[in-house]
Image: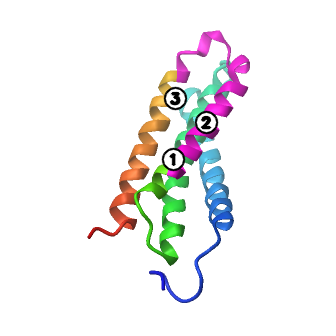
């Protein structure tokens, strides 16, 4: 029997949908907050880049932690669970970066490496939090 109580563990698709939904909502708010903090919502042309950075960075942090927590809620997880969650987030961020490459514009390409560093930093923090709280040490 798992850690969190009675009954079978949540199916993986439910865990992914719940984690992704919560990560999108909180990441969306983080993206809007980033745009507001950057230029108070006045469009300088780089709002899309700042919004996508905030969306993916905060979304990655939330998704990895919530995914690990929900998987841990009913059964033990290994160290690979947060790593696979991070891989899922990074692949979505890569797809979004490639799709929005032309829309960001060449003037604001300096935001892309900064955004990737921030996304990977948030993913690393989420993996460390998940490993500390949700993975049992022997």
From what the image shows, is residue 27 above or below residue 36? below
- Gap between marks 3 and 1 measured at Cα: 15 Å
Residue named by callout 2: 93
Residue named by callout 3: 115
Quarter of the rendering containing residue 98: top right
Q: Which residue is drawn at 33% across and 69% down?
A: 136
- Gap between marks 2 and 3 measured at Cα: 10 Å
Q: Nearer the viewer, mark 3 or mark 1?
A: 1
Disc with the residue nearer the chain's start (2 vs 1): 1
- Whether tag 3 and tag 1 are in contact, CB under 8 A, the answer is no
The number of discs equals 3
Residue named by callout 1: 86
Task: Please tell me which residue lies in front, 107 or 69.
Answer: 69
Q: Residue at x 64, y 60 (%)?
A: 16
Q: What element carries label 2?
A: helix
- Find the magenta span and give its range: 84-112
Position in image of residue 91 (x %, y %): 60, 38
């Amino acid at each position: 029997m798992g850690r969190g109580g009675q009954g079978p563990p949540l199916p993986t698709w439910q865990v992914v949908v719940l984690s992704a939904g919560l990560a999108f909502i909180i990441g969306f708010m983080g993206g809007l907050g980033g745009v507001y903090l950057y230029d108070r919502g006045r469009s300088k042309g780089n709002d899309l880049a700042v919004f996508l950075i905030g969306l993916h960075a905060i979304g990655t942090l939330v998704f990895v932690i919530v995914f690990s927590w929900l998987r841990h809620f009913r059964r033990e997880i290994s160290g690979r669970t947060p790593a696979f969650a991070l891989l899922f987030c990074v692949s979505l961020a890569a797809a979004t970066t490639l799709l929005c490459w032309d829309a960001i514009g060449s003037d604001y390409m300096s935001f892309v490496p900064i955004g990737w560093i921030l996304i990977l930093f948030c993913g690393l923090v989420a993996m460390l939090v998940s490993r500390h709280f949700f993975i049992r040490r022997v």
